[in-house]
Amino acid sequence: MASINGCDLLCFFILIASGGVGTQGYRILVIGVGIATLMKASFDLILATLPVMHTSNILIFSSGSLIGRSYSILLPTSIFIMLLVSIIVLWRRLFSAMVLPDSVIDSLGEPLSKIRLMLIIIAAFLAGTAVSIAGPIGFVAIAAPIIAFKSFPHHLFPIFPTMCIGALMVLCADLLGKNLLAPVEIPAGIISGMVGGPLLLWLLYRHSRSMSRT
């Protein structure tokens, strides 16, 4: 519960610092990166004060890893995740409107700010639950939706393809981490960062080229 509460608190703080719901995405992204850097520095400071014998498991968890995870940990969190996913499925038509321009959503009479806030709250709970299981496995949340939108262009809100692609990315990162330098196990978060970083740069490059052409 600590990771879920922490994620919700930081999400709330980012929204306030960026100007609230409806702020342009780049402001939220920049402030989020800044707060993440601050949290990482605080974590490293605390870690430096702990005895070495207590730091190995903490380092593995902070890198994002499935090492040592069992069904006893997975089962209760899976129930909570499925509950949140059920809410998304029930409201998927309303959430699908978020890909439309704001003027179109307003013309439909939908409460834009409330829908965005609800999506942010659900996303924060999902992210916090995932982190409580495996730690922060980076770039999956960025790459999986983009790949899903590219692979299923006719879906306005491809929730199930995104879930499957994200799970597949984590499993592939975990398998690579276990077999790449066996018997040494590399945390899945490190593998996803090595792959996700260049992928993000490539996507930004493609976006900048498409914008320059238009």
Image (tube, helix red, strand yellow):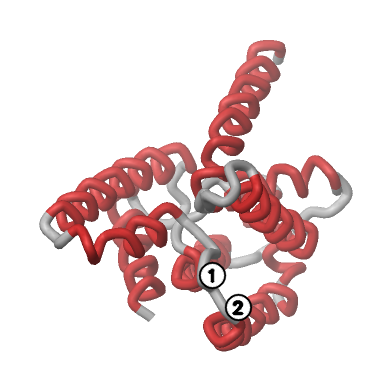
The first of marks 1 and 2 along the sequence is 2
Where residue 194 sits, quadrant-wise, is: top right
Eyeballing the image, is 187 above or below 3? Answer: above
How packed mark 1 is, by other alpha carbons closer than 10 Å (few <14, some 14-19, many 20 or more), is many
Q: Secondary structure at mark 1?
A: helix
Q: 5 or 15: which is nearer to us? A: 5
**Circles 1 and 2: CB atoms closer than 8 Å:** yes
Identify the secondary structure beneath mark 2: helix
Q: Nearer the viewer, residue 159 or 133?
A: 133
Residue beneath the point at 45% across and 62% down:
135
Q: Amino acid at mark 1?
A: Leu
Residue 24 picture location, percent across and down? 46, 42
Which residue type does callout 2 highlight?
Ile
Task: Looking at this view, name the residue that lies furthest to the front.
Answer: 183
- The disc at residue 126 is 1
Dot label at residue 155? none
Which quarter shows the N terminus? bottom left
Residue 102 x %, y %: 61, 49
